[in-house]
Image: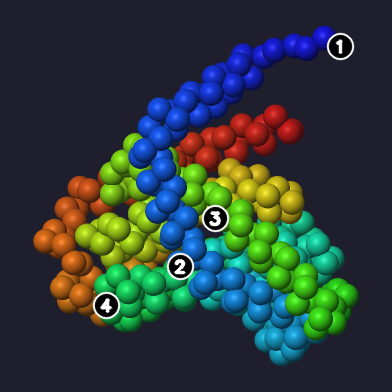
């Protein structure tokens, strides 16, 4: 067997070797960051997400989803041009948090309820931090104001719904008899399957949080870059960011969340560049909606910052958003080049 080496393979090997060497050389900082990431997952992420995720997955895996789909599924049809059966996955995904929407979408796809086209469309907008994280963890715990969390959550929901509606504008609405429902599991089987899927997802999420927290602690990224890397630590520890900017970060989700969803993105036949592009679009929409909401419903600065630095200069906000815009441009160019190669 002849083994051929390509330049990109050599570069990949060197990059990974250097990364491992850096973590070993900066073991103290990496260990502290990893410890913080593990504590975050153990004390916040897993307790708040695991029970909810299991229940939501059970709804989708049993006939309970048919109640929502048949009763309110017309909303998915009218607003998003999607089958009725997608409504439970959309509403539970937006309310439940980042991995929930993607996991429920994949479950529908594997069950044969939706095709790849519908699954990819859902992945573009069925993405939100969830009411538990945004309202409770951020609004109540960080800013001591549930109202702040509610407004941030509304801004993110509006951003996702806007994208979903925009994607449906060129979609031909299908006849009602098109909507079919896949096989449902018994309650016992659904509990077993839902628990397995939820645990597997959260274990993967915990591993990514630990890795990104270790890297973040080594390089000590700025307060404007840190949320792009790992959203939870970046937002919870940088409370002097403006609320509209925080809303934009929440809509983007952070690359740590993105990597957690790579397996699902690939499973539904979607390119990461496609997913990333709509995260950037969602960030801008969420920023604009939050700007409007906090203009009409102003919040006292004292409730959302425990530091002496209460405001963020306009130039710093523009810098972060400009970075997202540049990233979006790269994604668009990359996607166009990929399409040309396929043609």
The circle drawn on residue 160 is none
- Specify the color scheme: rainbow
- The secondary structure type at the circle numbered 2 is helix
Image coordinates for residue 103, horizontal then vertical, percent: 67, 64
Disc 3 vs disc 1: which is toward the camera?
3
Disc 2 vs disc 1: which is toward the camera?
2
Disc 4 vs disc 2: which is toward the camera?
2
**At 47% from the left edge and 76% from the top edge, which residue is drawn?**
131
Q: Report if residue 53 is visible in the image.
A: yes
Q: Which residue is mark 4?
A: 144
- The secondary structure type at the circle numbered 3 is helix
Q: Could you tell which of marks 2 and 1 lies nearer the N-terminus?
A: 1
**At 58% from the left edge and 23% from the top edge, which residue is drawn?**
12
**Left or right for 182, reference 97:** right
- Quadrant (top left/top right/bottom left/bottom right) for the N terminus: top right
Q: Which residue is mark 1?
A: 1
Q: Which residue is mark 2?
A: 44
Q: Could you tell which of marks 3 and 1 lies nearer the N-terminus?
A: 1
In front of the other: 182 or 2: 2
The circle drawn on residue 206 is 3
Q: Residues within 10 Å of mark 1 (few under 14, many from 20)?
A: few
Q: Find the distance from the CA under tag 4 to the CA under tag 3.
A: 27 Å
**At 68% from the left edge and 54% from the top edge, which residue is drawn?**
264
Q: Could you tell which of marks 2 and 3 lies nearer the N-terminus?
A: 2
* Image marks 4 and 3: residues in contact by CB distance under 8 Å: no
Q: Report if residue 229 is visible in the image.
A: no
Image coordinates for residue 75, horizontal then vertical, percent: 64, 81
In front of the other: 234 or 84: 234
Image coordinates for residue 69, horizontal then vertical, percent: 73, 83
């Amino acid at each position: 067997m002849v083994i051929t080496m390509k330049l990109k393979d050599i570069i990949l090997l060197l990059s990974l070797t250097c990364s491992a060497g850096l973590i070993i050389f900066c073991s103290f900082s990496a260990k502290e960051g990893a410890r913080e990431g593990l504590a975050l997952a153990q004390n916040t992420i897993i307790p708040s997400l695991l029970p909810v995720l299991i229940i939501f997955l059970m709804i989708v895996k049993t006939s309970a989803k048919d109640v929502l789909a048949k009763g309110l599924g017309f909303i998915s049809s009218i607003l998003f041009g999607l089958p009725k059966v997608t409504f439970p996955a959309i509403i539970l995904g937006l309310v439940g948090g980042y991995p929930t929407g993607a996991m429920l979408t994949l479950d529908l796809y594997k069950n044969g309820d939706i095709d790849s086209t519908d699954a990819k469309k859902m992945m573009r907008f069925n993405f939100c931090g969830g009411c538990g994280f945004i309202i409770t963890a951020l609004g109540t715990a960080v800013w001591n104001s549930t109202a702040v969390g509610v407004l941030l959550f509304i801004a993110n929901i509006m951003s996702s719904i806007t994208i979903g509606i925009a994607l449906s504008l060129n979609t031909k609405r299908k006849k009602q008899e098109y909507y079919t429902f896949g096989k449902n599991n018994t309650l016992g089987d659904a509990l077993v399957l839902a628990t397995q899927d939820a645990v597997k997802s959260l274990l993967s999420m915990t591993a990514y949080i630990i890795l990104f927290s270790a890297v973040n602690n080594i390089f000590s990224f700025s307060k404007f870059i840190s949320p792009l890397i790992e959203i939870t630590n970046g937002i919870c520890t940088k409370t002097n960011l403006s609320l509209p900017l925080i809303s934009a970060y929440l809509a983007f989700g952070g690359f740590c969340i993105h990597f957690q969803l790579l397996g699902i993105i690939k499973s539904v036949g979607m390119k990461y560049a496609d997913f990333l592009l709509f995260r950037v679009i969602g960030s801008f929409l969420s920023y604009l909606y939050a700007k409007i909401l906090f203009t009409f419903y102003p919040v006292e600065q004292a409730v959302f910052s425990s530091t002496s630095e209460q405001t963020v200069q306009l130039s710093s906000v523009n810098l972060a958003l400009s970075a997202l815009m540049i990233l979006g441009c790269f994604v668009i160019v990359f996607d166009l080049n990929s399409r040309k190669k396929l043609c």
